Amino acid sequence: MMKVSLDAYKLLEFIQENKEDFEDSLLNEASNVKEKIEEILTVGNIDLINNAHMLIQYIIEGNEQELQSFAKQEGIAWATHAIPLSFKLEWVQAIRRTLWKFLQEYNQLANKVFTEEFFSVEKQVNNQVDRFLNVFFITYSQYKDSLIMAQKELVENLSVPIIPITPTICILPLIGAVDLYRTNILEEKVLIEIGKLRIQTLIMDLSGIMEMETEVIDHLMKIIDGTSLMGCTTVITGLRPEVVRNMINVGMRLNEKALTLGTLQQALNKYLLS
């Protein structure tokens, strides 16, 4: 609780009695957010008006623990739903200014002059708001980073989808652009999965690859060497003419390192029907 002459409960009661005026003042202070109130409620289930009253209660009561917990909760919610931070900053500053205004009105109605104690309250309010913003932004940043990492891992896993079709045979269909970054992921995951699943035959279908740079082809050859060292046979299917032409131009002979077949269907016929 704030150890000042202003009674926290009476101040909260004053704000509640003038709730409509308080909310009107708050919305006038946050003109940009005002237009997004319903959208933010729909997108993120975040009730800005109700949350403003909760924050004000924690500030006035000096409830540090609840304030920080609420800030963390808000940080996670805003990061999860990717709501622009500019709205949050404008909204909290509007809460600060509106609370100042009602502090002054309450003080005047209580027939109190602007004493040192009153300004001490205002200072504590500012400190509490700043603390809320600090915890909010730290939590937002940390949670956003964790979401980005999780999404990155998901994309990486989707970019190298190893699909078991028998206990010892798997298919790896590659689609889209393949650069050095993706081949690094490919190398790591392929070798790990071969060891984990005891894969004996890996069918790598390249029919979804339109082109492949020379350095990427070279890396692919090294991956095939790695699978061979682990006792796994690599079968390449669906090579496009453009990719084959690049291999020929640099003197690479893929068929010396792996079995090559025209289509994935041919590989499935060979290994599943034999």
Image: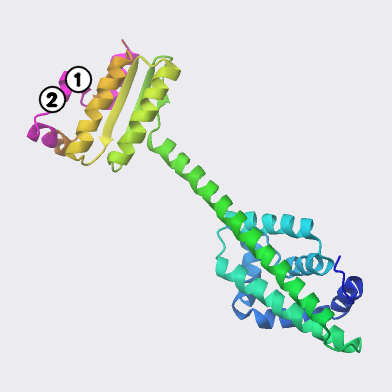
Q: Hey, which quadrant is residue 82 in on the image?
A: bottom right
Kindly indicate whether the residue at mark 2 contacts the one at mark 1 (C-beta within 8 angstroms).
yes
Disc 1: which residue: 257
Q: Residues within 10 Å of mark 2 (few under 14, many from 20)?
A: few
The way the protein has been coloured in the rendering is rainbow
Q: Is residue 35 left or right of residue 264?
A: right
Q: Which residue: 80% across, 82% down?
A: 102
Q: Position of residue 89 (x, y in %)?
A: 61, 70
Q: Which residue: 61% across, 74% down?
A: 90
Give the magenta part as a residue range.
245-273
Q: Amino acid at mark 1?
A: Lys
Question: Is residue 66 shown above or below 202?
Answer: below
Question: Is residue 166 shown above or below 82?
Answer: above
**Front position in the image: 15 or 33:** 15
Q: Position of residue 246 (x, y in %)?
A: 13, 37
Q: Position of residue 86 (x, y in %)?
A: 56, 70
**Does the magenta portion include 263?**
yes
Disc 2: which residue: 253
Q: Amino acid at mark 2?
A: Arg
**Front position in the image: 133 or 269:** 133
**Does the magenta portion include 271?**
yes
Q: Hey, which quadrant is residue 104 in on the image?
A: bottom right
